[in-house]
Amino acid sequence: MSVSVGDEGDSLCEINVTPMVDVLLCLLIIFMVAAPPPANTQMPLDIPTASKQEGPADPSATLLLTIDATGAATLGSQPLSADYLALVGELKANQKLQSDGKVAIDAAAGVKYGAVVRMMAAAHEAGVMSVGIASDRL
């Protein structure tokens, strides 16, 4: 703490913070070095051994809307129309699709993005609440 007297006789009191910060940093380093190292234990994990494979004949499997490289679409094994309104009608007429309320879209590698979005829009317009994208297993 320093006191200085100005020209007019005013006193100015200031606390020098630098030594206090130095002491606190030294204490922090001392406590970090003195602390015991953390225990090197492993957490127990329950990893599933194998996932359930859904086959096309499985009644609980999600319907798969497949788009091939030419742009032709099939719902399961049923080919779908290229006309948008007819496509929506075919999706509305499918009983399993309407009862499940979900479909997965699997597109070939060369399919344009617009074709996939068109199928998603048709499924939503047909009343399907959950439209997903199918992927290959990694």
Image (tube, helix red, strand yellow):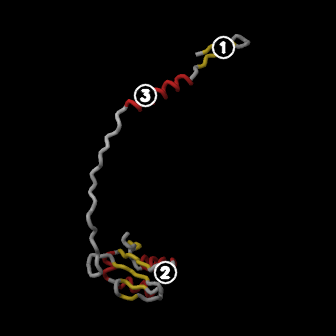
Horizontal and vertical percent for residue 27?
45, 26
Tell me which label, 1 or 3, sits earlier in the chain.
Answer: 1
Q: Quadrant of residue 127?
A: bottom left
Tell me the residue at 58%/20% (across/down): 15
**Dot 2: element:** loop
Mark 2: amino acid: Val
Looking at the image, is mark 2 or mark 1 nearer the viewer?
Answer: 2
Mark 3: amino acid: Ile
Horizontal and vertical percent for residue 63?
34, 78
In the picture, the disc for residue 111 is 2
Residue ID for mark 1: 4
Q: Quadrant of residue 120?
A: bottom left
Q: CA distance from mark 2 to mark 1?
A: 81 Å
Mark 1: amino acid: Ser
Tell me the residue at 63%/13% (across/down): 3
Q: The N terminus lies in which quarter of the figure?
A: top right
Tell me which label, 2 or 1, sits earlier in the chain.
Answer: 1
Q: CA distance from mark 1 to mark 3?
A: 36 Å
- Residue 131 visible? The answer is no
Horizontal and vertical percent for residue 24?
48, 26
In the picture, the disc for residue 113 is none
Tell me which label, 2 or 3, sits earlier in the chain.
Answer: 3
**Dot 3: element:** helix
Q: Nearer the viewer, residue 11 or 39?
A: 39
The reply to whether the C-beta atoms of the residues labelled 1 and 3 are less than 8 Å apart is no
Residue ID for mark 3: 30
Q: Nearer the viewer, residue 123 or 79?
A: 79
Q: Residue furthest right?
A: 7
- Residue 75 visible? The answer is yes
Q: Is residue 49 above or below residue 16?
A: below
Q: CA distance from mark 2 to mark 3?
A: 63 Å
Label 3: few (<14), some (14–19) or many (≥20) C-alpha neighbours in 10 Å = few
